Image (cartoon, coloured by chain):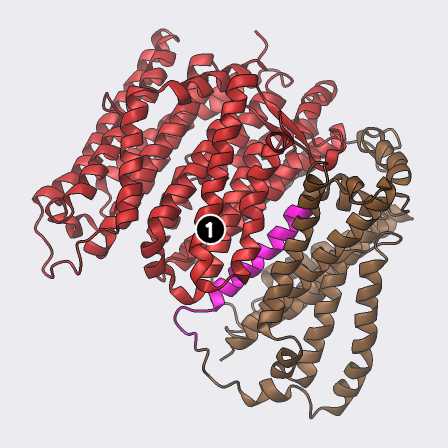
Chain colours: A red, B brown
């Protein structure tokens, strides 16, 4: 392995991170180009890391060359590689396509701050994905959270500010709970390295501080991951953020918190806390089911398209948690696969919204009238991504739901009820996606015809890349499937047989 | 004695916290927050955590009080009647507090040398700091080198906070950069003789203290975070005495942005240099022929980067608030 290849886990984080201060210093006109270049480079690094993980297994990296657990260790395995692809891919597509849309939303005089914050959000999310150290994860969670508050606050609507304030308070509470949990575990084990923690926690498992820590960490991360009923910050934050920022954050921000939740629960607690698997399933499965049903139900009656899709996200997080709460290879494969596929579908949908938004001021369902005729190509891509969201065969969304159904089937009789929930949720998705399609195809066009129907070329390309990825990974799901089954095996390797 | 004093401080802290929550006048709340920070700093000192005590005193009691006051100057001093339901909040907070109390039932005894935090990684740090770096302050060794990547992250947390405030306050409705500053922004407290004379005397000493804490961090408590806050406090004091505009003449906005970004770049560059010289990211051992010299050089440079970014961010935030005053 050449020396540069060995540095990939660190470069994954520091390339976007160090570009951020440069964006502040560069001439204004270059900030978008610098951000997009750094993001594409990060995507290239993620692809390279994924290839390495598939060929030769997990990659470890010692920051400052200090041995773990004394220094900070990074580690990239199949699960982190999958997440890195999602994070860097979503950021790159959104940035490449989003220049014009962001310039309109943010304003050119303060664009450079926005792009610097974007890069730090990307670096923060990537930093969480590669880290193998509990406190380091907290530090990067802070970077990504603060940066995403800036991204949401960039929305042109004044209502973005109360939305982001709620997001900030909830996010801070979540991060603080996580930190309290880490502090308690550190008190009892003296270590922050996750692998070391797993070994050392065994002696003190089932003591009060560890039990409280497990509670704090799980609830804190559930809050940041917007798991029902802790999702209240999400709909408005997604609705009032600039459309391109919504596409980026909806595709990956909550997933990264889900990732930390899975990592902590399966790597650190699962083997050591008695009855953990049962408790994990018993508490999270009902919440996952409620999340699917309530999220989809609200989406069915929502009038604002962005908020409709945001509530759909609450439901989709429910599917991911439902898979995880089965605590089986099949369930975890379905969960991690859905993590990837939902990012494709929702990222594509929000990108299409960014292109349609100039035509439909307000983005209520009734503003969507005539959209299918005004922007037929963009709307077609929207429909493709929508089909993937529903889970129609031939799209990525179908593959993960299929795995979820098979995993539930393995449970026997109780599994039938879970399959019922998945089918019901998908039917509700048909309803809410159809409501958008219906008003776009058959609705009355608004009184004042569109200012301009032309979708910028790069944005159109980004939308169609996302839409075609939904089809491609629906027909040939080899790569994500391989990563997610390997991730599930690693996660479950920590479950005593 | 330590325990008694600790109970005394924490009781005062509790009383202050309740007073902050109950205060309807935001000016009073800000002042009480300063007191709370000072009490926390004293508690840290009592636990022999001099570095964090210094940070808490400089940032919590010092600079953030000034920043809160600047924020108050562009909003109202009195809190509006809250629309949230206090009983639910109280229930949630009580539940969380009870769980925290529950979790202390089985914790190691205070000061127990056999406790996991003292017996696992700490001995290694104590032993290796001397061997690898030959500096007496192990806290600086852990923060600057052993866990230097976390500190890099913290610098970027500070940076993104600065970016966020600049982004929110520079633009959007209500922003008018062409507006000429109000007369007091030019004059400050120039007509008040006593604060002016006393303040002018103090500023050089505050700056000197800041530089001492910056460069003495390897030997005593201190480092870039504390030094940055103290230096920023000195400049803010100057701005209050001589007028915000005159402070901007000394350190114009572009310079502050340069400090903000430059500090973060300096820290990152030291890390990248580690890679270029054949080590891992943030490996300072390779920065000089002698690895101990390399470690010392690395820590000195990254602490300078931390100080630059913290100073730049705090002053940028201060000026952003000042520019939006009604």
**Residue B168 location, x and y as percent?**
47, 64
Tell me the residue at 52%/40% (across/down).
A125
Left or right relative to B102: residue A496: left
Q: Nearer the viewer, residue B132 or A326?
A: B132
Which residues make up the magenta segment? B151-175
In the rendered view of the protein, which quadrant contains the N terminus of chain A? Answer: top right
Residue B57 seen in the current view: yes
Left or right relative to A167: residue A461: left
In the rendered view of the protein, which quadrant contains the C terminus of chain A? Answer: top right
**Residue B69 location, x and y as percent?**
61, 72
Q: Nearer the viewer, residue A161 or A375?
A: A375
Left or right relative to A176: residue A461: left
Label 1 secondary element: helix
Prevailing secondary structure class for the magenta stretch in the rendered image: helix
**Residue A269 location, x and y as percent?**
61, 22
Q: Nearer the viewer, residue A223 or A268?
A: A268
Up-down: is A193 above or below A406?
Answer: below
Tell me the residue at 42%/67% (across/down).
A109
Residue A439 position by quadrant: top left
Up-down: is A303 above or below B26?
Answer: above
Tell me the residue at 52%/65% (across/down).
B166
Tell me the residue at 57%/60% (across/down).
B162
The residue singled out by tag 1 in the image is A35
Q: Chain of mark 1?
A: A
Q: Nearer the viewer, residue A253 or A182?
A: A253
The verdict on residue A475 being magenta is: no
**10 Å neighbourhood of mark 1: few (<14), some, or many (≥20)?**
many
Up-down: is A373 above or below B225?
Answer: above
**Residue B255 location, x and y as percent?**
62, 70
Residue A230 position by quadrant: top left
């Amino acid at each position: 392995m050449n020396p540069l290849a060995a540095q990939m886990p660190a470069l994954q984080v520091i390339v976007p991170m160090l570009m951020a201060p440069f964006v502040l210093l560069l001439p204004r006109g270059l900030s978008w180009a610098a951000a997009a270049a750094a993001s594409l480079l990060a995507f290239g690094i993620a692809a390279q890391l994924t290839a390495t993980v598939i060929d030769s297994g997990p990659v470890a990296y010692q920051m400052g060359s200090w041995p773990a657990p004394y220094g900070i260790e990074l580690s990239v395995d199949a699960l982190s590689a999958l997440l890195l692809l999602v994070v860097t891919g979503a950021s790159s597509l959104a940035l490449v396509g989003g220049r014009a849309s962001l310039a309109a939303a943010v304003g050119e005089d303060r664009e450079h701050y926005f792009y610097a914050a974007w890069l730090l959000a990307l670096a923060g999310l990537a930093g969480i994905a590669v880290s193998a150290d509990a406190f380091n994860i907290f530090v990067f969670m802070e970077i990504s959270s603060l940066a995403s508050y800036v991204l949401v606050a960039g929305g042109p609507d004044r209502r973005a500010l109360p939305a982001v304030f709620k997001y900030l308070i909830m996010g801070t509470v979540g991060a603080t709970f996580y930190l309290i949990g880490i502090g308690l575990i550190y008190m009892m084990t003296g270590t922050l390295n996750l692998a070391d923690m797993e070994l050392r926690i065994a002696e003190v498992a089932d003591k009060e501080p560890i039990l409280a820590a497990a509670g704090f960490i799980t609830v804190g991360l559930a809050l940041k991951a917007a798991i029902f009923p802790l999702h209240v910050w999400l709909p408005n934050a997604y609705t009032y953020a600039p459309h391109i920022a919504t596409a980026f954050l909806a595709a990956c921000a909550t997933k990264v918190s889900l990732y930390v939740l899975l990592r902590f629960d399966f790597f650190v607690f699962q083997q050591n806390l008695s009855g953990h698997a049962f408790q994990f399933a018993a508490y999270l499965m009902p919440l996952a089911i409620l999340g699917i049903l309530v999220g989809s139900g609200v989406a069915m009656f929502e009038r604002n398209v962005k908020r409709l899709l945001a509530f759909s996200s609450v439901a989709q997080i429910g599917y991911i948690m439902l898979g995880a709460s089965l605590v089986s290879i099949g369930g975890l494969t379905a969960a991690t696969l859905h993590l990837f596929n939902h990012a494709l579908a929702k990222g594509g949908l929000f990108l299409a919204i960014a292109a349609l938004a100039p035509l439909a001021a307000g983005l209520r369902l009734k503003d969507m009238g005539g959209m299918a005729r005004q922007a037929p190509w963009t709307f077609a891509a929207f429909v493709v991504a929508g089909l993937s969201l529903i889970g129609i065969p031939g799209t990525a969304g179908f593959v993960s739901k299929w795995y979820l159904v098979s995993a539930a089937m393995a449970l026997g009789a109780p599994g039938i009820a879970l399959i019922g929930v998945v089918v019901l949720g998908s039917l509700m998705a048909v309803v809410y996606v159809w409501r958008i399609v219906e008003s776009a195809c058959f609705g009355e066009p608004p009184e004042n015809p569109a200012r301009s129907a032309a979708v910028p070329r790069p944005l159109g390309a980004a939308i169609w890349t996302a839409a075609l990825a939904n089809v491609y990974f629906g027909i040939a799901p080899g790569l994500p499937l391989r990563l997610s089954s390997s991730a599930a095996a690693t996660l479950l390797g920590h479950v005593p047989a | 004695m330590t325990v008694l004093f600790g109970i005394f401080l924490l009781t005062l802290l509790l009383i202050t916290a309740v007073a902050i929550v109950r205060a309807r006048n935001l000016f009073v709340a800000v002042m009480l927050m300063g007191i709370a920070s000072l009490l926390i700093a004293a508690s840290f000192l009592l636990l022999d955590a001099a570095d964090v005590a210094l940070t808490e005193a400089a940032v919590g009691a010092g600079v953030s009080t000034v920043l809160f006051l600047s924020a108050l100057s562009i909003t109202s001093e009195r809190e509006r009647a809250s629309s949230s339901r206090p009983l639910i909040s109280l229930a949630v907070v009580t539940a969380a507090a009870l769980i925290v109390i529950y979790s202390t039932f089985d914790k190691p005894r205070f000061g127990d040398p056999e406790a996991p935090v003292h017996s696992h990684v700490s001995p290694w740090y104590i032993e290796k700091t001397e061997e690898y770096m030959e500096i007496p302050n192990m806290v600086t060794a852990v923060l600057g080198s052993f866990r230097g990547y976390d500190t890099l992250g913290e610098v970027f947390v500070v940076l993104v906070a600065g970016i966020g405030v600049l982004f929110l306050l520079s633009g959007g409705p209500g922003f008018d950069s062409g507006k000429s500053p109000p007369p007091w922004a030019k004059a400050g407290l120039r007509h008040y003789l006593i604060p002016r004379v006393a303040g002018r005397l103090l500023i050089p000493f505050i700056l000197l203290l800041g530089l001492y804490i910056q460069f003495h961090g390897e030997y005593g408590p201190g480092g870039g975070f504390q030094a940055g806050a103290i230096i920023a406090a000195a400049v803010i004091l100057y701005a209050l005495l001589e007028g915000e505009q005159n402070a901007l003449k000394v350190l114009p906005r572009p310079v502050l942005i340069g400090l903000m970004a430059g500090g973060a770049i300096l820290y990152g560059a030291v890390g990248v240099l580690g890679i270029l010289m054949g080590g891992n990211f943030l490996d300072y051992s390779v920065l000089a022929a002698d690895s101990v010299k390399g470690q010392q050089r690395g820590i000195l440079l990254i602490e300078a980067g931390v100080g630059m970014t913290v100073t730049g961010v705090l002053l940028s935030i201060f000026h952003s608030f000042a520019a939006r005053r009604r």
